[in-house]
Image: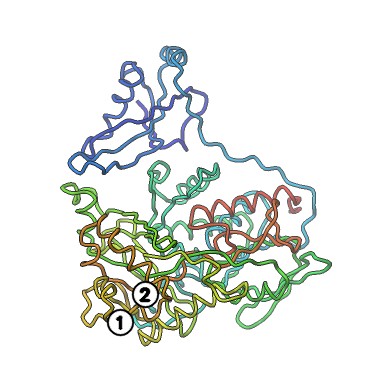
């Protein structure tokens, strides 16, 4: 019997059937799955000649009987196929990639991709694979050098404004839990997964219901993708920042970028703008250049950290040790505002995500094994346009207000921290429990750097969260501030994914069209495909 753990590497031609809702105890060996499938299909186990997992999820509702739920594809022997077809069993369709054919417009210069986060990296990757030789520019450093700058920030509190947890190859996702979930069922999801797997990710990400890479794995994958872009004729310039757009009669004709203080102008009539959510100076430049921008709702709050065993025991009970770090999702409504957990990092750490001198912010990060002693999540409150200062960039101004206050409280790139209990009771924490944040934490009253509606939301949601996870308040340490949940700005684009400046194609999280690694990567693929459909392939 052939076992292929996902549908990406399945031989074509043989008929396969989909079998859903198979349940197996968490301690049951997966070798039992074809037998369970055969029983459901009403065929003999020996009639199954190949099988694989399409989806695997954990059902933890009954703490004394945790189960994995599976969906399988099954390839039966030919003599069983007709019986299954007569009974109406659903055929399994192997994920197919979108077929895109080159357009007829001529490229002026070369296609430029701005930003090497998930959106820009995947856009450049697809363009390079299709022979378009893109130029990818990134204001930060390559991942290997970026890691050194981030380590220096954690050890000594020294921030490099151009190379940190947000800026550099891989974007903010490179210093995160590496979640690979998307809210929609976009058909490009399978393509993203297959690219990750081709560059070293475990095949399990293709079928886990909640897959993640971890910061260590995603950094290696990013470097591998970079090498392929270069091998396929792409060019990458690090420490290179977009300074200005050159336009004529409403169309892009070139860009100006700076590298080591030297500005260079190049011809360009097709540019993918994949800046991150923290590129505040670029948003200002785009507004001055006449791009149509709109303020966008987002969320802000704090990180909350607990000892990992509290969360693991609550979720998995007696199976906690063997199942590893557990996740949670919490949400509540307080005075018309959504209050919810965000970007939960099991077995991870809280990190500094500052990008601007005199401002500090936090985020969460986990390694692939999720084996650190703490688990953390953002607890954030929805921020509407009515909560922001006036103007298109009002959300950025509000972010900066909170980040300046947190920096002043901490006296640098440490972080102000407070127990959840003290936050509710309105007193500054004087003694803090040990925690994961580096370089240091300072006991503080976080309400002093949060707007009233955010403070009230976090306090108002406390009883809901404690009811869901006993000990959530008493054992929770809040670390502030979490301001970069998503972009507070959207760069408007039409159905062809083009902005009001012809030839400029905004996308990804910074442009307001994605929320996380998967959706940003998908948007990057769509942008690349749009440009392929529009422009001729360059002549070698």
Left or right, residue 179 beside residue 393 = left
Of 21 and 75, nearer the camera is 21
Mark 2 surroundings: few (<14), some (14-19) or many (≥20) residues within 10 A: many
Question: Horizontal and vertical percent for residue 238?
Answer: 57, 71
Question: Horizontal and vertical percent for residue 117?
Answer: 53, 62
Q: Quadrant of the N terminus?
A: top left
Question: Horizontal and vertical percent for residue 6?
Answer: 42, 37
Left or right, residue 83 beside residue 293 = left
Image-quadrant location for residue 374? bottom left
Taking the spot 73% from the left edge, 46% from the top edge, the residue there is 102
The mark found on residue 40 in the picture is: none
Disc on the earlier residue, 1 or 2:
1
Image-quadrant location for residue 121? bottom right
Of 259 and 338, nearer the camera is 338
Against 53, residue 206 (above or below) is below
Left or right, residue 275 beside residue 204 = right
Against 29, residue 275 (above or below) is below
* Residue bearing mark 2: 480
Question: Horizontal and vertical percent for residue 243?
Answer: 66, 76
Q: Residue furthest front?
A: 335
Q: Quadrant of the C terminus?
A: bottom right
Q: Helix or strand or loop: what does disc 1 sit on?
A: loop
Of 505 and 218, nearer the camera is 505
CB atoms of marks 1 and 2 within 8 Å: yes
Q: Helix or strand or loop: what does disc 2 sit on?
A: strand
Taking the spot 35% from the left edge, 81% from the top edge, the residue there is 414
How is the structure coloured here? Answer: rainbow
* Residue bearing mark 1: 444
Mark 1 surroundings: few (<14), some (14-19) or many (≥20) residues within 10 A: many
Mark pair 1, 2: CA separation: 10 Å
Against 95, residue 255 (above or below) is below
Image-quadrant location for residue 157? bottom left
């Amino acid at each position: 019997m052939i076992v292929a753990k996902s549908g990406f590497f399945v031989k074509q031609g043989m008929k396969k059937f989909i079998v859903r809702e198979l349940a197996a105890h968490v301690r049951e060996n997966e070798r039992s799955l074809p037998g369970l499938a055969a029983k459901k299909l009403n065929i003999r186990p020996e009639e199954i000649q190949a099988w694989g997992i399409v989806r695997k999820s954990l059902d933890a509702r009954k703490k004394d009987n945790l189960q994995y739920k599976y969906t399988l594809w099954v390839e039966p022997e030919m003599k069983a196929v007709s019986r299954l077809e007569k009974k109406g069993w659903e055929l399994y369709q192997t994920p197919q990639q979108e077929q895109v054919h080159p357009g007829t417009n001529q490229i002026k210069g070369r296609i430029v991709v701005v930003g090497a986060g998930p959106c820009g990296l995947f856009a450049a990757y697809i363009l390079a694979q299709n022979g378009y030789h893109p130029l990818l520019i990134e204001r930060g450093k390559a991942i290997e050098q970026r890691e050194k700058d981030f380590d220096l920030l954690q050890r000594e509190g020294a921030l490099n404004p151009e190379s940190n947890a947000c800026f550099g190859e891989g974007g903010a996702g490179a210093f995160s839990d590496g979640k690979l979930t998307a809210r929609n069922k976009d058909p490009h999801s399978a393509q993203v997964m297959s690219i990750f797997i081709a560059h070293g990710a475990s095949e399990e990400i293709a079928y886990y219901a909640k897959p993640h890479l971890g910061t260590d794995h995603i950094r290696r994958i990013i470097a591998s993708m970079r090498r392929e872009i270069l091998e396929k004729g792409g060019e990458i310039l690090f420490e290179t920042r977009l300074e200005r757009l050159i336009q004529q009669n409403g169309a892009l004709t070139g860009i100006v970028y700076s590298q080591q203080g030297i500005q260079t102008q190049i011809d360009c009539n097709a540019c993918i703008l994949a800046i991150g959510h923290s590129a505040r100076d670029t948003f200002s430049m785009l507004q001055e250049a006449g791009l149509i921008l709109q303020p966008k709702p987002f969320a802000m709050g704090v990180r909350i950290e607990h000892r990992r065993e509290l969360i693991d025991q609550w979720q998995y009970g007696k199976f906690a040790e063997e199942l590893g770090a557990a996740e949670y999702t919490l949400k509540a409504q307080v005075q018309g505002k959504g209050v919810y957990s965000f970007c939960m990092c099991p077995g991870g750490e809280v990190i500094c995500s500052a990008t601007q001198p005199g401002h500090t912010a936090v985020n969460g990060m986990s390694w692939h094994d999720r084996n650190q002693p703490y688990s953390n999540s953002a607890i954030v409150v929805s921020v509407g346009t009515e909560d922001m200062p006036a103007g298109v960039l009002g959300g950025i101004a509000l972010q900066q207000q909170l980040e300046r206050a947190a920096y002043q409280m901490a006296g640098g790139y440490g972080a102000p921290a407070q127990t959840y209990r003290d936050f509710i009771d309105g007193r500054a924490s004087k003694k803090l429990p040990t925690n994961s944040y580096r370089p240091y934490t300072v006991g503080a009253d976080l309400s002093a750097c949060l707007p009233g509606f955010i403070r009230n939301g976090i306090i108002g949601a406390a009883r809901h969260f404690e009811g869901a996870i006993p000990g959530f308040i008493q054992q929770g340490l809040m670390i502030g501030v979490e301001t970069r949940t998503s972009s507070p700005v959207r760069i408007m684009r039409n159905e062809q994914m083009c902005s009001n400046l012809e030839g400029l194609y905004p996308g990804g999280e910074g442009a307001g069209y994605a929320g996380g690694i998967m959706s940003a990567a998908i948007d990057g693929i769509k942008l690349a495909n749009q440009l392929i459909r529009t422009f001729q392939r360059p002549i070698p």
